[in-house]
Amino acid sequence: MSYLFTGADWNVSLIDKMWKSVEKSAKKFGWDFYQPQIEIITAEQMIDNYTYTGLPIMYPHWSFGKEFIRTKNSYDRGRSGLAYEMIINTDPAICYLLENNSAATQILVLAHAAIGHASFFKSNYLFKEWTDAKNITAYLQWASDYILECEEKYGVLEVEETLDACHSLQNYAIDPYKRPLPLSEKQIEQRSITAQELIQQSKNLLYDNLLSTQKFNKSIKVREDNILNYIAINSKTLKPYQRVICSIIENIAQYLYPQGLTKVSNEGWAVFCEKHILLDLYDDNLITEGTLLECLALRSGVTYQSSCTQVYPATRHYSRMVRFNPHYRSINPYTLGGSIYSDIERICKNPTDEDREYLPGLIGKDWKEATWDAMVNYKDSDFILQFLSPKIIREFGLVNISPIKMNSKINWAVQMTSDDDDQYCIDSSIDNYKEIKKTLSNQYSRENYVPEMYVIKYKDTIKNKELTLEYNALQGRPLDEILYGRTLGYIEKLWGEHVECVLAPDIEIDDDLS
Amino acid sequence: MSVVIDRTKAPSNRSIDNRRRFIKRHLEFIKQTLKEKISDKKIKGLVGTTEIILPVNDLVEPSFVYSSEFPVNNLIVPTKKDLIPGDIIEVPPQLKGQGKGNSPGENQFEELVINLDKKEFMDLIFEGWELPNRIKLSCIGDDNLKYERAGYSIAGSPSNLNIKQTMVNSIGRRIALQKQYKEKIEELSKIVPNDEKEINYYKSKLNNILYIDEIDLRYNYRELKPQPIAKAVVFFLMDVSASVGAYQRELSHKFFYLLHLFLTSQYDKVDVVFIRHTDTAEEVGIKDFFDATLSGSTCLIPALELTRDIIKDRYPTDQWNIYIVETTDGELLDETSEEVYNFIVNDLFPLCQYFIYTEVVGLGDRYIAEENGLSALHNYLYEINEDHKLAIGNLSDVNEIYPWCKALFDNEGDY
């Protein structure tokens, strides 16, 4: 068996050969994935792709121009590098490789993206339910053409303002509790026709008068999470083409919904796959030791995790001090996810007593089945809740910190920490590990970054004449006031009338910040 | 079954349209920033790529987000396992303003920097500016003639042979001529037994049809046509006498520099004549115009006379649109305001399209100044002027240069 390559150079036919070997290796583990469409691109083209947030094609809008300028500036000044890879959730999956990657990097990218991510996109339950990989490109092409047509008919400014308003509601364009509708242009046309019928209805004055004299039983409250859909169907002032644009935004939001909820699991799975494939290729003597080392070095760069705090130990003159590390950003999803998957494998193969206590479901299972199951059936918050073992908590040194007020300053206090001796104690009265796991899992749930805002409908109304939003504040957290005002302005513009926003009952906003 | 595509040669300009939309969207702010930059002292360094810094707050697309001032309870963070319960993490005071004091690891928005290249920059500052009253479109003389394509002719030189037309004609001719022979041959072949001699006769006729004949040839034909052009020349007259102080000189330098930038960037063919004068006038090159300093007293008429002479010499009025721009401090020594005005009206107005008089107002002592701080000449011209060909203005501050130019040249303005 000869090596696939020995130097850093590569050409298109070598990429093809690399892919075939990687694919063969992946099949050995029983992994299923979308076939890739591998595209070699320049750095400028990669910057272009960044601004489309991983979509193959998008309608034109100034916000993408802003992102492009920002990304380009950052790249030009050397402040950020470019990702080595990018892959789109389509079937076949479009996998971008940078032209100035070395050969070892390309094979790493193929293993990471074209196997890892592509299998995640194909098999994870959220992606299967919410995204239509086969049709998304055609749909986006249609959407982009439609918007350009609208610009010609109704003017660039009006269409741009509609898009601005819809963008502000991007997080509220899906209903996370209902099954999504399949992507189909006909459906959109149909919805726009239904909307037109509603407009006709609403012009019936007699009907209006009749409604205004009836008394409603307002006790049955129903909530509608898809605010954009509610507006698109019930607004009296939106034109038909604007309603179609709203539904375009809804469909795109639907497509993007799983990506925010599965970052850790997705990247972790890709990191996990690439490790196994690399080692397998090395065992088969298809890649040299040098290539393997280069890949491992890259991996360790990608999975680097900085600490959140810096401790200055006590000296003769100063007492012990703890400060925040200014370089810390967040928990690296590659690191966390990769560690969890590797840990699952370890528990399946060599469980310790601690594992038997905390993760009994994994004992004795086949590691390939167990990791596949973890990838397919969980989103991030559940993934962490289910599979985060005490060992990983110790590895990462995870602690729980909270802000406290001290002498009119806000500092942070360490509340609980994991045991840092490796000995496992059964008898601790407060199970720190479980608390930390639960808290961390909550950090990855959607309410943590999307404030819970929904429309209140009253079940008895025949049609919905008013728009009332209710804010269910998580932990009493307030919203950013300025952005709130501007968003409400956009919503009122779409709705055409005044919009009320109330607090959910029994919720208090914590205003005491100073 | 996999496909590997090399897209490196494909044009990477997907985002150019979006960038253009972004700039259009924030045009007002960008223009405002540009105006401020022009008023800056470093006007000469402006040409080249210009950086515009936009504050990000205006650019953020709004949506419902949690307030960043509210610190989150119970945050799980990774550490190096060196903390103990009860540790207090101090927030250093200087980080507080940046938002770090509230939650660790938050993103900091930077400003957005746009780089405008030279063309965009010029287009934005000089948007809508035009030299006014450009009505003289003349076309006399040999250098106004140009060859233009005018169809095909049947005779010409071999280098002008239009192959496509020739071939089209030859195909048509061949089809027409072949038809009769082909029909005959077909007819004869149907009769059995074949008359070999006849068939061969017609076949040879068929072969003898020329592939290209002389009547097929076509040549490109070009005609001489006169071109209507609008040529323009602008005379820059700058007063560099002793009474013009350093501050005023700087003002007039900047004024002319901006004008020069406008003319050279927006027009291909504008002549600029530089004349500097004290009590005598001389025509100089661009370097001397902007750099050198002289001393003497202020007299306008010599400069105006020189202008008139140059016009008569080199720029016949039937072919050129002529503009005259003058900056001075108005402190005339030997002349009176009437004399200047009469000269302008009698001698220069018939020749030129537009005369711009700009007074640079200085600080400190002025020899002849009226109550409103401007010179007698200025006030006289201002009162007596009825003709829309004479524009009168004054500059006392750097910030006024751009608005004054805009008022003069923006084709929406009154002047």
Image: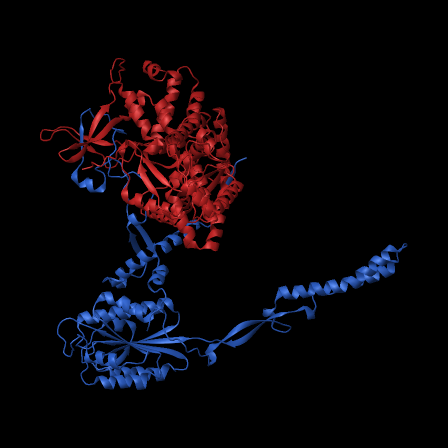
Chain colours: A red, B blue
A180 is higher (above) or lower (below) than B35: above
Q: Is residue A489 left or right of residue B293?
A: right
Q: x and y percent of residue A496 in the render?
A: 39, 48
| Residue A356 showing in the rendered view | yes
B405 is higher (above) or lower (below) than A505: below
**B31 or B251: nearer the viewer:** B31
Which quadrant, please, contains the C terminus of chain B? Answer: bottom left
Pick out the residue farthest to the right. Answer: B193
B21 is higher (above) or lower (below) than A112: below
- x 85%, y 58%: residue: B187
Q: x and y percent of residue A85 in the render?
A: 41, 38
Which quadrant, please, contains the N terminus of chain B? Answer: top right
**A291 or A331: nearer the viewer:** A331
**B115 or B391: nearer the viewer:** B391
**B103 or B331: nearer the viewer:** B103
Q: Is residue A414 left or right of residue B58?
A: left
Q: x and y percent of residue A125 in the render?
A: 45, 28
Pick out the residue farthest to the left. Answer: A317
Q: How many marks?
A: 0
| Residue A53 showing in the rendered view | no
Q: x and y percent of residue A9 in the render?
A: 44, 39
**Residue B33 found in image quarter:** bottom left
Q: Is residue B177 left or right of residue A284?
A: right
**Residue B313 found in image quarter:** bottom left
- x 30%, y 69%: residue: B405
